[in-house]
Amino acid sequence: MKIFLDTASLEEIREGAELGVVDGVTTNPSLLAKEKGDPEDILLEICRTVDGPISAEVVATDAAGMLSEGRHWASLHKNIVVKCPCTADGLKATKLLAGEGIRVNMTLIFSPTQALLAAKAGARFASPFVGRLDDVATPGMELVRDILEIFRNYGYPCEVLAASLRHPMHVVEAAKAGAHIGTLPMAVFRQLLKHPLTDIGLKRFLDDWEKAKKEMGQRTSR
Ligand code: G3P
């Protein structure tokens, strides 16, 4: 599964990128609004930091507006993927952008039928929001599984980008389901690596090594 970071924070993206396992970044207007600075500059710096798909979302709600914003985002850098919401206008804009060879990530997907339409419109990525469905007592991961099954049935090249992942078990379940991508907030990404037994085990190895070195030193100085 490819791992994307779901953040517009350059500090977090640099921290993640240094580990060498980050394949892309997803941003949205809420995430960009939290950062200081011009969104365009931030997106460009993200593109320079992570050489993979970087989602930049349109804020227009009509197809013509989405098309012109999408063209603009895509012209900034080869890594930019245009994020369009899964609405009627979003679908129209996706079809047109895809026709121009611009990659689209169709976002705010909450049903298998929305995902089917996204794939038919030529979206390169479909983003079901797992956590937000869980929030309303609807199992979000089932949506991921349904979409994967539908895409497999027809060989759609659209990748399932599991979004709104809130904790490591969401990541495990998305990977078990076969989601192509999981996008994670930095806090969740950090949690993926942590295990107390790793820390305890490493400390024991190093302590034993130090002890053995000391004993060896004592033997040779006798
Ligand atoms: O990628 C979509 C994500 O930003 C939404 O996450 O936690 O706000 O539902 P959340």
Image: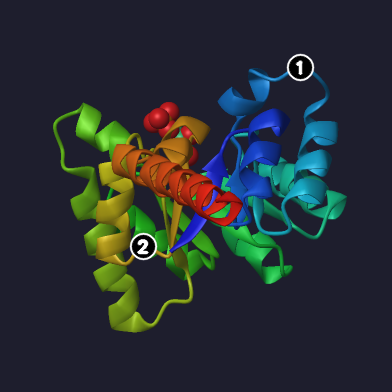
- Image quarter of residue 42: top right
The x and y percentages for residue 182 are 43, 52
Judge whether 222 appears above or below 135 on screen.
below
Residue type at tag 2 = Ala
Residue drawn at the location 82% of the way across and 49% of the way down: 48
Q: Quick one: label 1 or label 2, which is nearer the N terminus?
A: 1
**Image side of residue 104 versus residue 150, left or right:** right
- CA distance for labels 1 and 2: 32 Å
- Image quarter of residue 53: bottom right
Q: Which residue is mark 1?
A: 36
Q: Which residue is mark 2?
A: 179
Residue drawn at the location 62% of the way across and 53% of the way down: 24
The x and y percentages for residue 29 are 61, 28
Residue drawn at the location 77% of the way across and 47% of the way down: 49
Judge whether 162 appears above or below 108 on screen.
below
SS for tag 1? loop
Closer to the camera in the image, 57 or 176: 176
Judge whether 82 appears above or below 160 on screen.
above
**Image side of residue 66 versus residue 151, left or right:** right
Q: Residues within 10 Å of mark 2 (few under 14, many from 20)?
A: many
Say whether mark 2 is within 8 Å of ligand 1: no
Where is ligand 1, by quadrant? top left
Residue type at tag 1 = Lys
Q: Confirm whether residue 108 shows in the render.
A: no
Q: Confirm whether residue 101 shows in the render.
A: yes
SS for tag 2? loop
The x and y percentages for residue 20 are 63, 56
Q: Which mark is residue 113?
A: none
Quadrant that contains the N terminus: bottom left
The x and y percentages for residue 61 are 59, 34
**Image side of residue 102 versus residue 122, left or right:** right
- Image quarter of residue 16: top right
